[in-house]
Image (cartoon, rainbow, N blue to C red):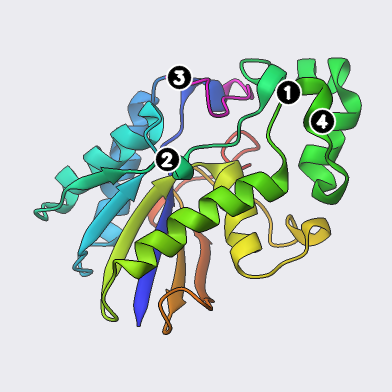
Amino acid sequence: MTKLYFIRHGKTEWNLESRYQGMNGDSPLLSESFAEIELLAKSLHAVKFSRVYASPIKRARLTAFELISDLKQPLKVTLMSNLAEFNLGKMEGMLFSEVKEEFPVEFDAFRNHPDQYNPVNIHAETFPHLIKRFGQAVKLICDNASQDDNILVVSHGAALNAALNGILGVPLEHLRDRGGLSNTSTTILETTNYGRNFEILKWNQTDYLHKEFDLTDTI
């Protein structure tokens, strides 16, 4: 059995501000995020990992390096561009409230109706494209894994939510049914046939953070 531990990066300044980051936007991790990454590491201390993969975007890359340091395991990070966040086009850098006012149709569809999301007007990426490229990364990861490997994958909330549901065969209109993913959360999928099929073991696990969550923590 190969287990993939999908980690959403630590909370950032733009997360706190309810501002879209996307593929080309970025902002620093909050100071408290480093303590939360350490709590994440403590929750995983009994797991021996064989490989670590991460999005090359700084907030995810830094989360991966901090996590490895806290785990105290001799692991190297492989950066994969296909694990990057959604390309959100014109929405990147904008507050959610600003996007809702300027691009109300795209805002509502992206958040609530992925099957109706048409990003042509905002020069952004579609859900099928994101699911395909992210799925290619997961397939490559599984192709290079052994049956008993535990693998860390550090990425982004919107990308992980869409891609993991897509990998599990969830139709576009139901991508949001399981709810969003929180900063520094853990979602675990298991495969027994090198990534051809997956089973969910945990979704959006955050109990180790010992905190009360607000709307800026989850996407």
Q: Secondary structure at mark 3?
A: loop
For label 3, the residue is 27
Front residue of 159 and 208: 159
Separation of disc 4 and disc 1 at Cα? 13 Å
User: Residue flagged by tag 4: what amino acid is it?
Assistant: Phe
Position above or below: 218 against 165: above
Residue 120 in the image: state x and y as whole percent: 81, 28
**Front tag of 3 and 1:** 1
Residue at position x 84%, y 36% in the image: 118
Q: Main secondary structure of the magenta part?
A: loop
Position above or below: 203 against 80: below
Q: Secondary structure at mark 2?
A: loop
Name the mark on residue 107: 4
Separation of disc 4 and disc 3 at Cα? 21 Å
Q: Are marks 4 and 3 in contact (CB under 8 Å)?
A: no
Front residue of 133 and 49: 133
Within-10-Å neighbours for mark 1: few <14, some 14–19, many 20+: few
Q: Quadrant of the C terminus?
A: top right
Q: Which residues are magenta?
A: 16-27
Q: Are marks 3 and 1 in contact (CB under 8 Å)?
A: no
Residue 85 in the image: state x and y as whole percent: 53, 37
For label 2, the residue is 9
For label 1, the residue is 123
User: Residue flagged by tag 1: what amino acid is it?
Assistant: His
Separation of disc 1 and disc 2 at Cα? 25 Å
